[in-house]
């Protein structure tokens, strides 16, 4: 007598995806045995082959626009890599404080990094890839040791082809701080044009001036505010890329570090060996809290971009719509959702779209 579904109603492992539920026939015997063989191979030390196969399957799923499966495989790969990563042993000191004190942590970080000024404002950048076609970046901002959620930013990498974390980091740092430079010039053009003053000092002085002026008016107007410390997620490569862009912008004196989360190593410009802090230090706990803000934002942005791409792919099957015409329509109307609301006359007003083609597009979108 074989157990049936009624016998296993108490078990929720298959619902939370911890089990394929072979006991109640939710997976074919052959597929289940294949998974058992794969697990045995992994435990026998054939981990590289397993990881390579998963990477290939993830790329294949992304190419087929099966982004939900690609995301599952990406998470699975992350779990495998964490399992396979070599572990460091350490002993915690006695009397480790459990309470978080953001102000004290910021002061301690200033001391260990030997900074002249308190890093009250910190901005941290992270690059996230799910496939060669989706690369995004996030910037989290901390103020006095606490998240400044209102000033978090996210970026879609535009100039980098394929997966290149170093070039992507350079792009997002360049975009962030070149914009601040431009805003400073627009806010106080006469002051910003002073050629004899260091750009970093000029920007800080302009920011303080605008901040004081805003407080004097009793409003929360916009003003330029550079961070006291820039953090890039990664090791020497990411740090070097960010440092190169900062130099080009004249911000070479702006404090900058790289944070390699896997081994909690801090990389500094001009210093070959990483700085490793004891685990009971508030400065390290502060640095550990900063990257926690990346996950929900990068995941949400990936999902948004995937949804847009799926929506936009509908136009690929529309008769008469070339890639160039598709790009023109999306540039004019912004999205397929807005395109669906347009009339024939609205579409015919776009350069390169005839009235006949406009009618065909409207009819196509009604049925797809």
Image: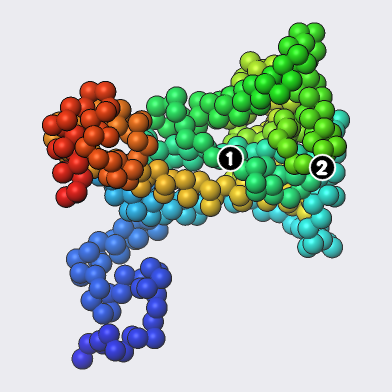
Q: Residue at x 63, y 35 (%)?
A: 232
Q: Which residue is mark 1?
A: 153
Mark 2 or mark 1, which is nearer the start of the sequence? 1
As drawn, the label of residue 9 is: none
Rendering coords of residue 56 (x, y %): 31, 43
Res 328 → quadrant: top left
Position of residue 172 relative to residue 34, above or below, is above
Res 10 → quadrant: bottom left
Q: Residue furthest bottom?
A: 1
Res 209 → quadrant: top right
Q: Nearer the viewer, residue 251 or 59?
A: 251
Position of residue 215 relative to residue 208, above or below, is below
Q: Residue at x 48, y 38 (%)?
A: 136
Q: Residue furthest front?
A: 345
Q: Which residue is mark 2?
A: 218
Q: Residue at x 71, y 44 (%)?
A: 142
Q: CA distance from mark 1 to mark 2?
A: 26 Å
Rendering coords of residue 4 (x, y %): 25, 86
Q: Nearer the viewer, residue 132 or 329?
A: 329
User: In the rendered view, does 233 fall on the left or right side of 29?
Assistant: right
């Amino acid at each position: 007598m074989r157990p049936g579904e009624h016998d296993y109603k108490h078990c929720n492992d298959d619902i939370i995806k911890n089990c394929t539920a072979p006991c109640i026939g939710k997976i074919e015997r052959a597929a289940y045995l294949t998974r058992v063989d794969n697990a045995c191979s992994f435990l026998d030390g054939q981990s590289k082959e397993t990881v390579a196969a998963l990477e290939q399957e993830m790329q294949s799923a992304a190419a087929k626009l099966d982004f939900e499966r690609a995301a599952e495989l990406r998470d699975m790969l992350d779990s495998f890599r964490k399992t396979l990563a070599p572990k460091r042993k350490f002993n915690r000191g006695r009397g480790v404080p459990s309470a978080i004190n953001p102000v004290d942590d910021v002061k301690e970080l200033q001391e260990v990094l030997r900074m002249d000024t308190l890093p009250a404002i910190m901005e941290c950048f992270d690059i996230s890839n799910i496939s060669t076609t989706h690369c995004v970046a996030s910037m989290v901002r901390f103020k006095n040791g606490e998240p400044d959620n209102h000033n978090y930013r996210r970026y879609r990498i535009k100039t980098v082809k394929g997966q290149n974390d170093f070039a992507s980091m350079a792009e997002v740092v360049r975009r962030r701080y070149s914009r601040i430079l431009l805003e400073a010039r627009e806010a106080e053009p006469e002051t910003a044009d002073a050629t004899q003053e260091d750009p970093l000092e000029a920007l800080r002085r302009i920011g303080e001036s605008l901040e004081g002026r805003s407080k004097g008016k009793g409003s929360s107007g916009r003003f330029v505010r550079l961070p006291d410390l820039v953090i890039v997620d990664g090791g020497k490569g990411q740090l070097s890329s960010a440092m190169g862009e900062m130099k080009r912008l004249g911000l070479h004196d702006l404090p900058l570090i790289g944070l390699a989360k896997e081994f909690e190593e801090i990389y500094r410009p001009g210093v070959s060996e990483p700085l490793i802090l004891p685990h009971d230090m508030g400065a390290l706990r502060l640095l550990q809290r900063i990257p926690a803000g990346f996950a929900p934002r990068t995941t949400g942005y990936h999902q948004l971009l995937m949804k847009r791409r799926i929506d936009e792919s509908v136009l690929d099957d529309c008769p008469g719509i070339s890639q160039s015409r598709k790009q023109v329509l999306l540039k004019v109307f912004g999205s397929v959702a807005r395109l669906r609301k347009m009339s024939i006359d609205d579409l015919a007003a776009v350069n390169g779209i005839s009235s006949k083609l406009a009618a065909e597009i409207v009819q196509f979108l009604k049925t797809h």
